[in-house]
Amino acid sequence: MGEPLFVVDAFTDRPFEGNPAAICVLAEDRPEHWLASVAREMNLSETAFLRRVAGGAWSLRWFTPAVEVVLCGHATLASAHALWEAGLADPASVLAFETRSGTLRAVRRAPEIELDFPAEPAVPIPSPPDLLAALGTGATRFTGRNRMDFLVELDSEAAVGGLTPDFPAVAAATRPDRGVIVTARSTSPDRDFVSRYFAPAAGIDEDPVTGSAHCCLGPFWAERLGRRKVIGRQISTRGGTVGVRIEDGGRVTLSGRAVTVSRGELL
């Protein structure tokens, strides 16, 4: 028997949009080089590996085609969706995932899934000229940094959508950080802000929808808008929508939908 394998589009309610993640459910622990090889084979922005551990929780690790990452929202959403849909977990249960970023939880609030994640606010820094040049932009409204990424706010949604980055230069400018989030206030009444996310140093030129980036974007826009709940739209080619609610204790709740595209076995 092989390992159950799913491909799930996250932060969308329709197939072929949002961010696809491969979800592999393991019966036993596997060596890191094997996990990395599977992620390269899947060649999606993230492959998630799940394994049941003591107390009913699940071990969860995330790999890009190039590196293991410390936090990933869309593949966590996809993992919860796959476990519930396949009957591997009770849909009424709260799922606990043991990860490199501590315990993360998922709960089903139909039609959405809610994720309990750490808030990752950015602190202001001087704008790095090499990063702005690599992005192809000049003036910024804000530049910051958290433990994973740079955050750059531009003047308009059009400016964010019009970026054509030099990806090798972005990789050089962001190392050893994971990548760069670019954002602006939205012009649409049904969302508060837009964003794009670039992480070529981690093997992802542009990520379609980045849940973990919203652990930074949520606090950033909630403070500016004076609200505890905000809605973001990542305006990649595939696009996706992420709700963020600011919680006490340095946490955020991310919310979104997911759709299974394929299921099978990894032989």
Image: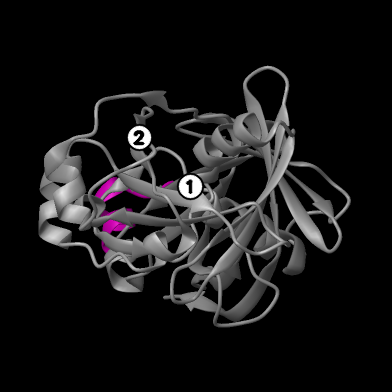
**Is residue 188 found left or right of 151 in the rendered image?**
right
Residue 10 seen anywhere in this rendered image of the structure: yes
**Is residue 139 found left or right of 221 in the rendered image?**
left
Q: Is residue 266 magenta?
A: no
Where residue 220 sits, quadrant-wise, is top right
49 or 158, which is in the foreground? 158
- Please state the extent of the stretch shown in magenta in the rendering: 26-37
Vertical comparison of 84 with 259: above or below: above
- At label 1, counting other C-alpha atoms closer than 10 Å, the crowd grade (few under 14, some 14-19, many 20 or more) is many
Q: Which mark is residue 72?
A: 1
**Is residue 41 found left or right of 82 in the rendered image?**
left
Vertical comparison of 7 with 142: above or below: below
List the residue tagged with mark 2: 148
107 or 137, which is in the foreground? 137
Q: Quadrant of the C terminus?
A: bottom left
> Could you give the CA–CA distance between mark 1 and mark 2, rounded to whole angstroms?
11 Å
Amino acid type indicated by mark 2: Met
Residue at (24% x, 58% y) in the render? 203
